[in-house]
Image: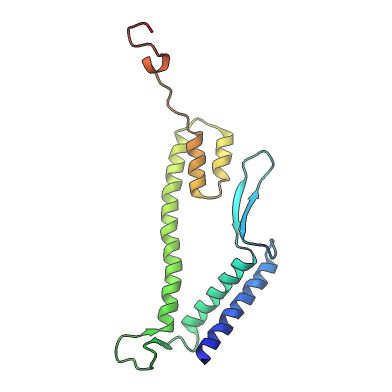
Amino acid sequence: MTFWLIIGIIVLAGMAGGVINTFLSDSGFIKPGWEEIGEEGKPKKRIWKPGGIGNMIFGAVAAFGSWGLYGPFSQYVLIPPSNTQDGPYLALETLVGALLVGIGGSRVITSEVEKKILTFTASTAQASPADPLAAAAIGTASSPTEALKAATEAAEPVPATGAAATGVPAGGTP
């Protein structure tokens, strides 16, 4: 019981740190959500703000991660519930390490996907005629996918030539 009580105290302390961070940030204690930033009549940038609840969750995970890796119970055996280490076992530091690697690893993979989207966005925008409004929409997009949508919308379709453009068959009358 003491082990789980200590985990609860560590998580609550991390949440308290998240609350303090919330009050130190420029937004204060707000609800999580998207905020649009920009001038009226111009493309606006959407920014995700985690708010007070998000900061509390991040604080709890960070505190648990630090304590689980470096605290006095880091070698505590969770599975099997006995303290024997004769066979395979799961220690607290292994579980916390997996949590942190999962967060970091998924961020790396997400960054690689977003990099490919941004590369495609750049090539799409480069192939389009110069348009300051489209450039502003791409530059202030809230995510790489939104930037790609703006670049795709700004791209002009290739004008049709010949019969397709005039409706007149080649060498004939309508």
Taking the view exactly as shown, the residue that stands out farthest to the top is 173
Q: Nearer the viewer, residue 153 or 82?
A: 82
Nearest the viewer among 172 and 70 is 172
Is 129 situated above or below 73? above
Residue 52, image x and y in percent?
A: 64, 67
Q: Is residue 127 left or right of residue 13?
A: left
Residue sitting at 55 percent across and 87 percent down? 6
Q: Judge left or right: residue 64 versus residue 119.
A: right
Q: Quadrant of residue 135?
A: top right
Quarter of the image holding residue 59? bottom right
Task: Determine which quarter of the picture holds residue 74.
Answer: bottom left
Tell me which colouring the rendered structure shows: rainbow
Q: Give the image location of residue 55, x and y in percent.
A: 61, 68
Give me the residue at 46% from left, 81% from top: 69
Is the residue 18 above or below the residue 117 in the image?
below
Q: Which residue is at a point 61% across and 57% down the rendered structure image? A: 33
- Percent across and percent down for residue 30 are 68, 62
Residue drawn at the location 62% of the way across and 72% of the way down: 18
Query: Extreme left residue here?
Result: 87
User: Residue 2, position in %: x, y?
Assistant: 52, 92
Give the quarter of the figure containing the C terminus: top left
Count of labels in the image: 0
